[in-house]
Amino acid sequence: MSDMDYIDLRSDTVTKPTPEMREAMAEAEVGDDVYGDDPTVNQLQEKAAEMLGKEAALFVPSGTMGNLLALLVHCSRGEEVIVGDKSHIYVNEAGGMAALGGIFPHPVPNQKDGTLRLDDIRASIQPDDSHRTITRLICLENTQNICGGVPLTAGYTAQVGQIASEHGLKFHIDGARIFNAAAALDVDVKQLVAPADSVMFCLSKGLVAPVGSMLVGSQDFIARAHRLRKMLGGGMRQVGVVAAAGLVSLEKMTGRLKQDHARAKILFEGLKQVPGLRLEAQPSSNMVYFDLEDQIELTENQIIAEMKKHGVLVDWSAPRQFRLVTHYWVDDAGVEKTVNAFRKVLK
């Protein structure tokens, strides 16, 4: 069985570029982006900034680099950032803020709805005391992956922005899937990021581009991030060949994410009928989380191997727990095939 024959629900990072993207990549006008003269990259950056209502944007190789750049711009060594204890920045970015930035994370419990309690944020802001670190930044993740791909509302984000403003703090949003949040809440993405000083979002997940993320913020913020991108080895040359796919992402893929969300709900309802699976919260976006009931004796890895034999690729997210992610390349037939495969494997 070839890769193209599998229904791949391990993540939306597995998406391959569409034929339209490949054509755009082949025909892209390019220049040297380190000099700032790749016209396709410049067009992508202008489009990203406009769509999120910010002054400027920077094309970066990955979301992890985009988040790290934001942290490095906003914080000096020894300063502190308030982050969710289930956030990607804290859990899944290899400790980059500490290892490379000397930045101290102050984790706050993520609630089931993905938020951080406002009182917890306020209580985490350090007093002006020479014994303490200096709090400099608050970070949110939208959608919040580990909490189930849940979107954070514009109203909540505005409240966090108000806390940041009142205490003279910077505010960064890890918006890897911010367009999924906008689709789930049926709002303009600008509303979800209006209070933030900086936002990172990925082109290579639900937006289907083969590589790349965007960092947006003020002109001054992006100028500083541009210099640091070079320091981290992220200065790319004739990179318009991939930026061209990102333009298709922004123009075509941002408007179709509700289809992925609808299929996630269908997948959820189908899996609820499979004996041995425990599903609780209906998916808010494109992620379906579920647990194995105690009577299932197969291990996670055994289930993964058996599902692959049925043409479906899945992955576990925690002991006895799976996460399935719908995306452009998962159609209605793929959802049905997945439910049937689980029924056979767990029978």
Image (spheres, rainbow, N blue to C red):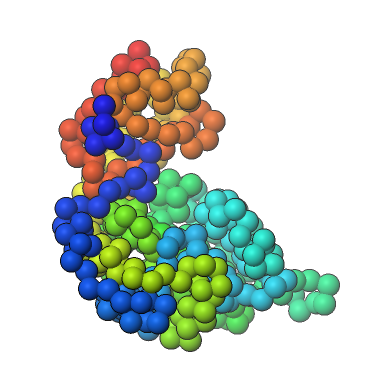
Q: Which of 170/103 is in front?
A: 103
**What is the x, y in percent for residue 243?**
30, 67
The quarter of the picture where the N terminus appears is top left
Quarter of the figure with residue 75: bottom right
Q: Residue furthest right?
A: 131
| Total numbered badges shown on the rendered structure | 0
Q: Which of 246/175 is in front?
A: 246
Q: Is residue 68 left or right of residue 185?
A: right
Q: Is residue 288 visible?
A: no
Q: Which of 287/242 is in front?
A: 242
Question: From what the image shows, is residue 301 above or below residue 229?
Answer: above
Q: Residue furthest bottom?
A: 220
Q: In this view, does 23 lie to the left or right of 188?
A: left
Q: Look at 41% across and 56% down and name the residue there.
A: 143
Q: Is residue 326 visible?
A: yes
Quarter of the figure with residue 120: bottom right
Q: Residue furthest top?
A: 347
Q: Look at 72% across and 71% down and name the residue there.
A: 78
Q: Look at 52% across and 54% down and name the residue there.
A: 88
**What is the x, y in percent for residue 210?**
32, 55
**What is the x, y in percent for residue 67?**
51, 65
**What is the x, y in percent for residue 30?**
27, 73
Question: From what the image shows, is residue 336 above or below residue 24?
Answer: above
